[in-house]
Image: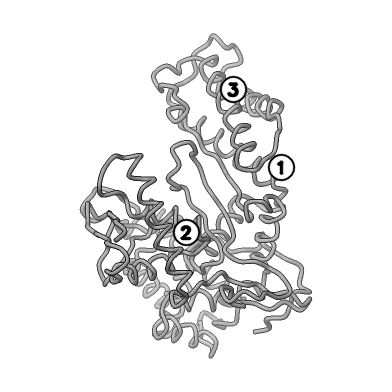
Amino acid sequence: MNTNNVSTKPRPQSVKKFYFLEYFYVLLKSVQSSSHTERIFEQFLELKQKYRLGESRYKRRVLEAEGSPNRMVRYRYTFEQVVMEAKDYGFVVSDNGSISLTDSGQKIISTYEDDGAVECYQTLFKYMEDKYQAFRYLIETCYANNPEKSGLLIFPIYSAYRLGINRDSIKTSSDLNNYFDTLQKRLEDDIQKYLNQQCSLSDKNKELVSSLIDSEIIPNDPSQPFNPTKYNVIMKRVRDFWLKYFLQDLYNFSISLNAFEIWAYRGKQAGVFHITEFYPDPNFSGRLVYPLCVVRGSTNSEQFDNLFKYSDGKNLYLHQPSWDNEETQEEFLQQLHYAYLDIRNQVRSYFVNLLSVRERVCYTMRIPEYLFDQFLGYAYRLRSKIRISLEVDKLPEETKVMYVRREPVVVDGKSRNIIAVDLN
């Protein structure tokens, strides 16, 4: 692998269509057991089920039953996408219906099994960046758009309910227009608040309404009722319209929304990016995206590790503070306590959602989720400075949820989801 190939033009749009980096391990482990493509596919499905990997960006808790033709088409498509990308990186080679593992592919398996998932994902990151250089493109574009807030980008998503509009009150085209206008104002306010920019979205709002009318999704006459069975379709069209506007018009990304999300969620697994729809801010609804690394020639900070070197002399430095540093410990304990108090004041309960606390601390300290989990484990055992109570409310397997929308926090080998904090 050449880690100095910045001369290759960034090709972020070329990404294959799957989110989970664990798919590489699942494929390579399947190839390790057989060279016949169909047998590899069968093993791939078994491991896909074992690791609860779906086709969306969320892991499944309730797995789909096998056998449905439509599902098998989706599974086959995902399998082929993973195979193609694994071939791009030289992990496998194929010939006449057989797939074979290379030395590089074997090293990925060993890294995952011996050093853990995070180490494996960061190794995969180097292969991805060497091939596509998508992460540098995303990181530098983020910083260019919002340097004052370290590359923070917002992608607001507001339902009618979130804007104080009762669903039952939306019956006519005029009622929908009221929602569209209210949403426009809220988006303008968010752009001012989070990006420190002033802009009018009136023309874009008119463009949205015109497109819905032209598609005969809503009536042209404001007094006419719209088809209530199309309500969810309308909401999806509105959401996708504004997400695309933010990505391509406001932030000037030259890639599709789908490609952006795949790279961002892959970057989250490797610890170089954070993307979330669950930031616990009662005044904001939508996605937050921000880098956890910088691209520059050099750094004197001990909190950054050099993860990738480019041929133009720049490097990608990952923010990786160490618990051995006393200042890092103090900052983490302080931010953990602040986050706990903020959320406790919202919910007025002694125990609060641990995943929401994690979101706030990760945002404030600009650290990946896996570091938060490590630091929380250290702090939990640090009885002299802080008292932390970790409990379990309802775990995903105790509910009817189909997807695990946020990775659990694991401390001392146990999943925890509520926390109480007191400083000594």
Per the image, the residue denoted by label 1 is 249
CA–CA distance in space, label 3 to label 1? 19 Å
What amino acid does circle 2 point to?
A: Cys
* Contact check, label 1 and label 2, Cβ < 8 Å: no
Label 3 vs 1, first from the N-terminus: 3
Residue 362: mark in rendering: 2
- Is 1 on the left or on the right of 278, as rendered? right
The tally of labels here is: 3
- Is 311 on the left or on the right of 63, as rendered? right
What amino acid does circle 3 point to?
A: Asp
**Mark 3 or mark 2, whichever is nearer to me:** 2
191 to 132, vertically: above or below: above
Residue farthest to the top, as pictured: 223
Label 3 vs 2, first from the N-terminus: 3
Residue 181: mark in rendering: 3
**Mark 1 or mark 2, whichever is nearer to me:** 2
